[in-house]
Amino acid sequence: DTEVTQTPKHLVMGMTNKKSLKCEQHMGHRAMYWYKQKAKKPPELMFVYSYEKLSINESVPSRFSPECPNSSLLNLHLHALQPEDSALYLCASSQGFYEKLFFGSGTQLSVL
Amino acid sequence: KNEVEQSPQNLTAQEGEFITINCSYSVGISALHWLQQHPGGGIVSLFMLSSGKKKHGRLIATINIQEKHSSLHITASHPRDSAVYICAVRLDYGQNFVFGPGTRLSVLP
């Protein structure tokens, strides 16, 4: 299994909603990443988890809350988002920090 | 100046043409990745390079560490190669990648 699976594929939410994005991989990768990508721009790093511990938070607003419940799962909890948070949210994983990246297909998020 | 630059920004080719996309970077790196992103989002890692040259099917990637430059070549291009190609470098310190702005390729039948 060489896949990173993200759910849902599409999400529409209001500014007062609470929702979660889910990412799963069964490749035994120890590094997992959340990226945000706006249209026609490269991905921007949000968070990095290493061995289930948060190792990088790129000054992301607290309305985004990551969670790594186990080595295969990565969640991104969303609360009180703004319309400018609408973007494609990509999850990725790698065996180590010097290994190939595997990306999920992303969650297209629209905040109304 | 961005740490990772790509050229061209946009490229239109006829089916069958040989295509070259270039990436230059200004920082010390441990590896360089070429990524492909189709409309709709999903990103596929094509190559990871730290030296020399790699080939996979019709794709060839090269890197010159001294010149801080990498190229992605596509031989016998096909409309299904139409995508955004992104160069991403792993810094030789830290845990993050720095992404280039991407090259948008359209291959016409």
Image: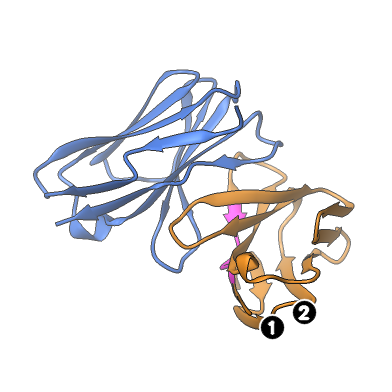
Q: Relative to A30, does residue A97 appear above or below in the rendering?
A: below
Colour in which the image shows chain B: orange
Query: Label 1 is found on which chain of the structure?
Result: B
Residue depicted at 61% across the width and 32% down the height: A2
Dot 2: chain letter = B
* Residue B87 left/right relative to B51: left
Say above or below: B4 vs B31: below
Residue B54 highlighted magenta (yes or no) = no
- How far, Cα to Cα, is label 2 from label 1? 6 Å
Q: Give the quadrant of the N terminus of chain B.
A: bottom right
**Can you identify the residue that label 2 sits on?**
B17
Apparent side of residue A10 relative to residue A91 in the rendered image (left or right): left
Quadrant into which the C terminus of chain B falls: bottom right
User: Who's the residue at 81% across and 55% down the image?
Assistant: B57
Q: Which chain is blue?
A: A
Q: What's the image's color scheme?
A: by chain
Q: Are marks 2 and 1 in contact (CB under 8 Å)?
A: yes
B49 vs B84: above or below: above
Residue numbers of the magenta segment: B98-104
Question: Mark 1 highlights which residue?
Answer: B14
